Amino acid sequence: MSRPNARRTAGKKPAGQNRPVNQEPDKPGLETRRVATKLLAAVVDAHASLDGLTDPAHGQPNFRALDARDRSLVRAILMSALRHRSTIEALLARRLERPLPANARALSHALHVAAAQILFLDVPDSAAVDLAVTQAKSDPRLARFAGLVNGVLRNLIRVKARALPAALDQTREAPDWFAGRLEAAYGAETTAAILAMHRVEPPVDFTVKEDPQRWAEALGGIVLPTGTVRIARLEAGVDTLPGFEEGAWWVQDTAASLPAKLLGDIAGARVADLCAAPGGKTAQLIHAGADVTAVDLSKSRLKRLAENLTRLRLDAEIVESDIRKFQPDTPFDAILIDAPCSSTGTVRRHPDVPWTKSPEDIEKLAALQRALLDHAVTLVKPGGRIVFSNCSLDRAEGEDMLEAFLAETPDVALDPIQPDEAPGIAAFVTPEGFLRTTPADTLGEDPLARGLDGFFAARLIRQR
């Protein structure tokens, strides 16, 4: 008797044969937890970017294979697990009779994912435990720890009402290197305030083209002293909000909006925005009346910049180039360079940063910033202004780098920022004439006005 399908099926396992013997089909939600555990491991152990891993188009394949609802849940789990990593670590350690083996990283990550749900997310405790135990039983690396997972998490549930507030009071949400550098720069009190703000989900800020009060009312927010419109949170996608389609505003933290304002009156001036993508500062410069050239190394980020400008009905010359090799035909009147950095000022929005960066990364980035600034000042005409900025809290990428640059570059002088030259900035101008914001800063009495990204900015002038 012929067997027409024998060649086609040879060597292939029947569907489901990869599962351990007697294992039931996956429970609803189990794959979501597996993906969350895998991505947490990639962030903590491999120092991968959370934004990169969860990018809908180019992110981690298992994440992209989930439906939209499950992708949102994975991100929520990871944001909580990273935002409260030190607290979760402390609470889990107290539930264990002895520390986990050094080679049990997968177990540690699975426990963190489940604990994040139990402590910080609106997930039924029983479901979090059940899925964590099922995940352990189905993973050859974790199967022998299934009983431990069950016991630790059930213990955590019993004590969380009293243990969580105490742990939050006693724990700093940062690795030691990160907290130590903050203390060296800002002192213990300000560092504690910064780390406390890192636990809080940030509001959403908008830069609006015209009439901030009108858009504050339309979006359900307030107007900050800087002119930024702020709302507490997004209830749906940003593209569903009034004003999106007509390009009336763009999302931009109020701290990120300050550097472009430091160039002063730029109406009619030729201005280069270096490291321009995704384009918030580019949009500000265009809206202020400048003839803008937006330069960035990344083709994909420039594509996003172009899409953003199209929505906003704004035009700029867009150039894909390494800034260190960029040579315009004629010098610019002014330059804004928002340089690549460690992003330690954006931990409220990117809680993976302290766990993916290191002091060595900061030193390398500071060296890159210096190289970019060295070249940037050659692109502006004598008498032209240069504003250098980044979203790092670290002095090595801000004050220290700028002071060394000025000491070694006689053709460039500091053009000190004045407290009264732009609305809302007075509290952020340092005695040296730099601008420095931290997440612990506030912009008014309204509780919604608390907090902003950490930013550094300095204004320079090319003398000859």
Image (cartoon, rainbow, N blue to C red):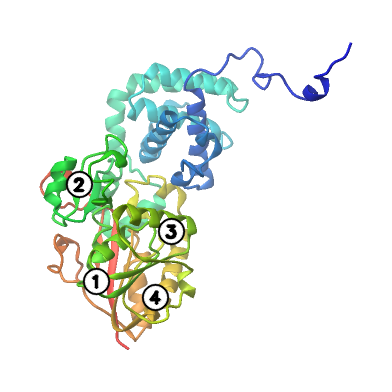
- In the picture of the structure, the residue carrying the numbered disc 2 is 230
Which quarter of the image is occupied by the N terminus? top right
Q: Which mark is residue 75?
A: none
Q: Quadrant of residue 395?
A: bottom left
Would you name the residue on which mark 1 appears? 263
Q: Earlier in the sequence, mark 4 or mark 3?
A: 3
Residue 438 lies, in percent from the top left, at 26, 55
The CA distance from mark 4 to mark 3 is: 19 Å
Q: Quarter of the image for the C terminus: give it.
A: bottom left
Residue sitting nearer the eye, 91 or 97? 91
Give the mark nearest the N terminus, 1 or 2. 2
Q: Look at mark 4 in the image and give the residue it sits on.
A: 376
The amino acid type, in three-letter code, at marker 1 is Leu
Q: Quadrant of residue 301?
A: bottom left
Q: Secondary structure at mark 1?
A: loop
Mark 3: which amino acid? Leu
Residue 357's spot in the image, x, y percent? 45, 53
Q: CA distance from mark 1 to mark 3?
A: 23 Å
How far is mark 4 from mark 1, CA to CA? 15 Å
Mark 4 closeness class: few <14, some 14–19, many ≥20 residues within 10 Å: many
Q: Is residue 288 left or right of residue 62?
A: left
Question: Residue at 55% across / 23% down in the picture?
Answer: 136
Tag 2: residue type?
Arg
Residue at image mark 3: 302
Left or right side of 112 for 146: right
Number of disc labels: 4
